[in-house]
Image: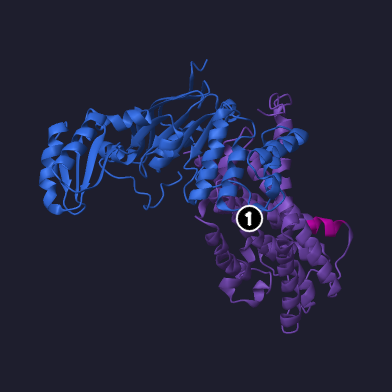
Amino acid sequence: MTDGYAVRAEALEKRYGEKRALDGFDLTVREGTVHGLLGPNGAGKTTAVRILSTLLRLDGGHATVAGLDVVRHSGEVRARIGLTGQYAAVDEVLTGRQNLEMFGRLFHLGGRRARLRAVELLDQFDLTDAADKGVGKYSGGMRRRLDLAASMILAPAVLFLDEPTTGLDPRSRGEVWESVRALVAGGTTVLLTTQYLEEADKLASHITVIDQGRAIADDTPDGLKNRIGGDRIEVVVAERSDIARVVKVVARVSDGEPESDETELRVHAPVADRVAALTDVARTLQDEGVRVEDIGLRRPSLDDVFLRLTGHRTDVSEPKEAAA
Amino acid sequence: MSAVDLTGQDSRGRVYWLLADVWNIVRRGLTHYQRQPVNIAWQLGFPILSVLLYGYVFGSAMKVPGGGDYKDFLMPGMFVMTMAFGFINTATLVVYDSTKGVIDRFRSMPMASSAVVAGRGITDLIAACAELAIMMLTAVAMGWRPDGGLGFLAAFGLLLWLRFALIWIGVWLGLMVPNPEAAGGLFAVAFPLTMISSIFVAPQLMPDWLGTVAAWNPISSTAAATRELFGTPVGGGDSWVEQHSLLMAGVWPVVLTAIFLPLAVRRFRKLSR
């Protein structure tokens, strides 16, 4: 029924007045994987997630989640998904346990099973010690974990994580990543939106880049990096006067024109045969007596990919994308 | 993955689950009170304080047309005021849930989304009963002596009937205002609206035009009607709306509900647009 895909979206359209939040957005997510949805503020990430999780109606196109149409079978879709939005949507007054029991009962588990499931999830998300404390006293990371636990009550087939680590400190972020990995190991498919390239790189096996409501690239993290050219050799010298000589040496092994940076005393260029290029350049520079501070190969980061694809950097300092 | 059987939760009918969902939302609201005793103290303390302050500070200076006891005039007014301010409470709780994503979580779940609003309303009515009970006991301690019996029950019912109508204004506003702080600002709007009514002062003692506005204020009808039902009919005016306060105390909430229930529902539906 799902033919191996947990999410299938074709030509999704969503308009707000004149603005096209989604403009022919396509997405396929394989079952049992973490799929990253990467894009700048206002690119349409949240809109896409809200449509797929049945919170928003679409203006055009077609989408299935767990093999079910999100419009015609929204009720059944809701029984098969979990959603963790940009805010930790848990009740701050109740305790962690009371939250999970309440959501469990609202997932129609009934009182006894809701209680048992809460105990199980508190343990799984390492919240047993804080189970009977009010959520208002939880740290950001704990709140997020509780939020994730609440999304996992029915062990959903598909979990939507909309910027799950926005606003968290690095340690809490690590905790959330751990939880997500554990969920996927248990068979859940995850669609993760993020502005953090590092997060997509670490967690996702597949990435869709979205900009202005459209998917502009869809590949593995490595595939995306390869797209903007492969590896680069990078040499940092001690003396500015050596830069010209280094450029000449690097040019012999490089695929393209070497670029140099006078202030950082750095020369870099794309290379095809990584190891041969590195050994050749290192030996020649040594023979010529050039003082080298550092030499190495660098893979392009997703940041570079992003810049190349969208023409702008991911900027996390901008105001957040509107929840609607 | 889980030792708990997570399947087969739909074996019972829709009506069963709708009622169960509503009850679970009510239970959540009541647990809030249980976990925040300070909030109860505040929510109940304010009306008690108002009764004491207005009763003793203003009581001696205030006149009632026809020379009744100001306490008999004031107490039903205070009950009405507490019911009227209740919509701020509803709005605050709704805006809190919608801005923190809790309403979105509910909507992404296989529960009935109407239960979110229905549960909120029932919780607020339960809280209103508690508020009224506490205020009435305070009033009795201060020497207020209402008639018992059916009239008393009818008055209690009319007060809740007003509170019921105001739930929808609260839900509607709660889905409109941008954040909980803004909901707190509703107090500044509500206060003058309750002053220009027959709650504290009889409209016929006000300047003509203001008296007319006050008499037609929906909460004035409830105040006048409950004064009558409590057996302490003081300071009733002779305009049509004041002469028919019992009728209007029943009608006004219907009108308010007819306007604001659809608006609230529309606003709730708009969340998916």
Q: Is residue A35 left or right of residue A313?
A: right
A238 w.r.t. B108: above or below: below
Instruction: Work out whether residue B65 can be spotted.
Output: no
B271 or A76, nearer to the observer? A76
A88 w.r.t. B155: above or below: above
Chain letter of mark 1 equals A
Q: Is residue B246 left or right of residue A160?
A: right
Amino acid found under the numbered disc labelled 1: Gly
A6 w.r.t. B203: above or below: above
* Residue occupying the far right of the picture: B149
In the rendered image, residue A198, in percent from the top left (x then y), is placed at 40, 41
Chain with colour purple in the figure: B
In the rendered image, residue A179, in percent from the top left (x then y), is placed at 56, 38
- The shade of chain A is blue
- Residue stretch rendered in magenta on the structure: B150-156
A127 or A286, nearer to the observer? A286
In the rendered image, residue B159, in percent from the top left (x then y), is placed at 74, 58
Q: Badge 1: few (under 14), some or many (20 or more) residues near its Cα, within 10 Å? A: some
Q: At 25% from the left edge and 38% from the top edge, which residue is drawn?
A: A308
The total of numbered circles placed on residues is: 1
Corner quadrant of residue B166: bottom right
Task: Report helix, strand or loop for mark 1.
Answer: helix
In the rendered image, residue A284, in percent from the top left (x then y), is placed at 16, 38
Quadrant (top left, top right, bottom left, bottom right) of the N terminus of chain B: top right
A300 w.r.t. B218: above or below: above
* Residue occupying the far bottom of the picture: B61
The residue pinned by badge 1 equals A136
Task: Provide the major secondary structure of the magenta segment.
Answer: helix
